[in-house]
Image (cartoon, rainbow, N blue to C red):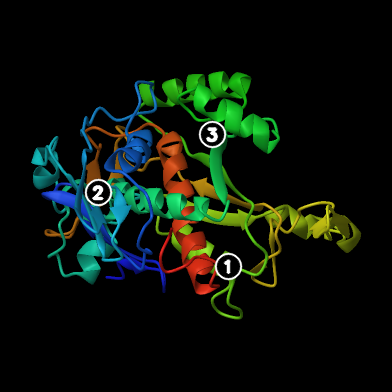
């Protein structure tokens, strides 16, 4: 398995959904960074399920434990070990249906690749549960990026085909946290909630789109031609279970434009070179251009649904049917918002260190 991400700021994730714990090792974080367990916990709490119709009833406390690398509120320069114990685990249904791969899940592919030795309970290593490790690492990366002025914010822009109205970044920062869907358009959020509730009562689920914006990113981040900034960001985003599409700036709509519409004209503002528009999403030639980095990810509907679906019995090699029982989110989009922010932070942090913008010791 490829469980590590980054070259200078490296994270290694471990654990399974129904195993003893999930955790992450962070290597390459400079010494002296002021960060507390409470700051990491705050980010992890944002990923926990809410009280609305979208969320699972699995009630993990998700209490963060710092194992190493932080002493008296500052990083030591040693690898940082962070861990969360799994406590609210019920594997009974998974044990009963071990050989019935759930449509839309990695049950079949994991069984095939690892010869049936993979931990299948709750999806094991392929569960959304592992994103808690991304968020822990992201909390450290976000704090480190803050020392060079980089800020990251994400929000829900669509669920079940219902689209939020476009908002300025200040509106996003002010309003995205005002509802359980993390949508900066309150009216759209209400419509989305009704759609999620309808899908849930029908034993179904919904997907959506998350937009993430990184502000004050210095120009020059990226290592073409193969370690491009959008290339590594895309790779990292696809590590999030259920992400099926990634686009930057105007994305796929650029294919419908003329060059005169797609290009971002340059100008000088306050002594700095900027662009008048940002169709490129802050990246040109695989390198940040100093404008806000804008990335959107498409999140598929939760594949665990109560409706009966066709599958097979992998042991008996005969057709079968399956209605997934258990505790699952009717829409995972809101919970994925802090995960997308975390992945953005980890990737940008790695490139910032590689560019020499972060010192080895933070004073």
Of 201 and 337, which appears nearest the observer?
337
Mark 1 surroundings within 10 Å by alpha-carbon count, few (fewer than 14), some (14 through 19), many (20 or more):
many
Of 179 and 300, which appears nearest the observer?
179
Label 2: element kind: loop
Quick check: can you spot residue 164?
no
Q: Is residue 307 above or below residue 342?
A: above
* Residue 72, label in figure: 2
Disc nearest the viewer among 3 and 1: 1
| Relative horizontal placement of residue 261, taking residue 146 as reference (left or right) | right
Disc nearest the viewer among 2 and 1: 2
Residue 100, image x, y percentages: 19, 50
* Residue 229, label in figure: 1
Q: Is residue 305 above or below residue 188?
A: below
Residue 153, image x, y percentages: 55, 42
Kindly check if marks 2 and 3 are in contact, taking CB atoms under 8 A apart as contact.
no
Label 1: element kind: helix
Disc nearest the viewer among 2 and 3: 2
Sequence order check, earlier mark of 2 and 3: 2
């Amino acid at each position: 398995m490829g469980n590590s991400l980054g070259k200078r700021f490296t994270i290694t994730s471990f654990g399974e959904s129904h195993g003893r714990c999930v955790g992450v090792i962070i290597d390459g974080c400079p010494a002296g960074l002021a960060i507390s367990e409470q700051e990491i916990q705050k980010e992890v709490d944002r990923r926990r399920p809410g009280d609305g119709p979208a969320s699972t009833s699995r009630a993990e406390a998700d209490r963060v434990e710092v194992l190493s690398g932080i002493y008296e509120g500052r990083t030591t320069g040693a690898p940082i070990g962070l861990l969360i114990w799994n406590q609210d685990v019920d594997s009974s249904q998974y044990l009963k249906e071990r050989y019935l791969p759930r449509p839309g899940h990695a049950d079949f592919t994991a069984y095939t690749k690892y010869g049936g030795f993979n931990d299948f309970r709750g999806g094991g290593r392929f569960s959304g549960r592992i994103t808690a490790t991304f968020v822990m690492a992201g909390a450290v990366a976000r704090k480190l990026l803050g020392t060079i002025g980089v800020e990251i914010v994400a929000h829900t822009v669509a669920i079940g085909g219902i689209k939020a109205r476009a908002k300025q970044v200040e509106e996003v920062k002010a309003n995205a946290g005002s509802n359980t869907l993390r949508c900066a358009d309150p009216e759209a959020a209400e419509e989305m909630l009704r759609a999620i509730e309808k899908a849930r009562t029908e034993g179904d689920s919904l997907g959506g789109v998350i937009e993430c914006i990184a502000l004050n990113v210095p120009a020059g981040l990226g290592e073409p031609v193969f370690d491009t900034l959008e290339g590594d960001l895309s790779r990292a985003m696809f590590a999030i279970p259920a992400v099926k599409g990634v686009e930057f700036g105007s994305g796929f709509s650029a294919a419908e434009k003329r060059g005169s519409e797609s290009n971002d004209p340059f100008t000088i503002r306050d002594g700095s070179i900027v662009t008048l528009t940002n169709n490129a999403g802050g990246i040109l030639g695989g390198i940040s251009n100093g404008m806000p980095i804008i990335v959107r990810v498409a999140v598929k509907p939760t594949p665990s649904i109560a409706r009966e679906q066709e599958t097979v019995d992998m042991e008996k090699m005969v057709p079968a049917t399956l209605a997934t029982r258990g505790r699952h989110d009717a829409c995972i989009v809101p919970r994925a918002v802090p995960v997308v922010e975390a992945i953005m932070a980890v990737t940008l942090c790695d490139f910032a260190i590689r560019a020499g913008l972060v010192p080895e010791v933070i004073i």
